[in-house]
Amino acid sequence: MKPGFLVIEKETGTRSTSCVSVVKRVLGRNVRVGHGGTLDSTAGGILVLLVGRATRASRYVMALPKTYETIARFGLRTSTDDMTGETLEEHDAGYLDDGVIDRAVLSLLGLRDQIPPSISAVRVAGKRAHFLARSGESVVLSPRPVMVTSIARATSISHTREVKLLIRCHRGTYIRSLVRDLGEILGCGATVVALERTSIGPFDRAGSISSALLGESGREYLETRIIPVSEIHKGFTTYRVHPFHERALLSGKPVPMDQMERISWGGSLSESLILLLSERFVSFAAISRTEGFSTATPVTTIETGDVE
């Protein structure tokens, strides 16, 4: 079996860890299966699972930009920043119109501090915040920097004071917190009614497998749906490795940048991490600059051949 990625369209109400468990059961206990970032059970959409040696790419998949569609309801504040929580406050949001919302979302763009929701997976004193919150304990979370590269209204505000938003952001960004903050900017509060992740880097709904069908899938079928590890190059600035340098890179040695061919630009934010692509492996590499010369040193290398 070749290592690679399975793109799952997770249904709302299904746990991400359940998808991992089902795929592991179908492929066999000896096959490693991981994920490139989970989704809350209350959200649906794209979940990238990592198979075999591709599990080594987990942190790099998590670093890829993500896109979301969310429906925000204005005039409502809840304890969880979505409809699963208790109502804290309700306000009249009748003064809102599309223009007011369009101007407000601009303040959410770029690098900013964000306080995660109380039921997030952030750890507090070694425990998940959502565990503490659901146990009735008070949870105080610190702000953390997040990057939002685009946010726009996709529908006009409805009579129920709801709007669909399209968002592109990076690792660590909570959409529920963005909607909450937008409500605070507008002075009426807001909460998430529905949330779907539509892509993670180059991985989207095209070619995805419904989580509802995973349990009915056989090993042979899932193997045919595994996307090669090399496809991750679409999310990173990528250089083609000359066969002459393969042995050095597999040994962890640096290679001069001017002796490799750049084949694509990527969507990740890192200026010091690139992807090296060869017929035998992909390698995430760090760029170093010394005396005017740049070299790439492997950080994580994944061989792309068959593995049991």
Image: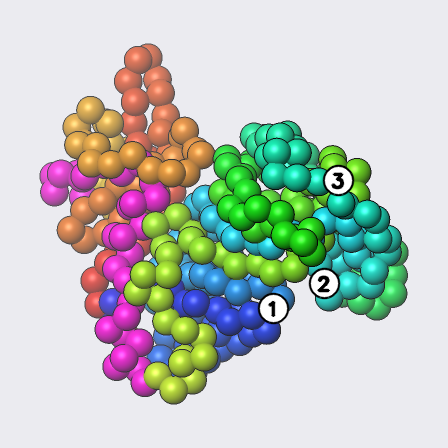
Disc 3 element: loop
Q: Secondary structure at mark 2?
A: loop
Which residues make up the magenta segment?
Answer: 218-247
Q: Quadrant of residue 265?
A: top left
Give the structural element (helix, strand or loop) at label 1.
loop
Q: Amino acid at mark 2?
A: Met
Answer left or right for 267 relative to 244. Answer: right
Badge 3 amino acid: Tyr
- How many residues crowd mark 3 within 10 Å: few (<14), some (14–19), many (20+)? few
Magenta span includes 226 = yes
Query: Where residue 250 appears, x then y in whole percent?
Result: 25, 47
**Residue corresponding to mark 1:** 41
Residue plotted at (25% across, 52% down):
230
Q: Residue at x 20, y 24 (%)?
A: 258
Q: Amino acid at mark 1?
A: Ser
Q: Nearer the viewer, residue 289 or 192?
A: 192
Q: Quadrant of the N terminus?
A: bottom left
Q: Residue at x 40, y 81 (%)?
A: 213
Residue designated by label 2: 83
Q: Residue at 73% x, 66% y: name it.
A: 84
Q: Mark 3 to mark 2: distance in Å?
A: 22 Å
Q: Nearer the viewer, residue 271 or 180?
A: 180
The answer to whether one can see residue 38 in this image is no
Looking at the image, residue 97 sits to the left or right of residue 136; the answer is: left
Numbered tag placed on residue 95 in the rendering:
3
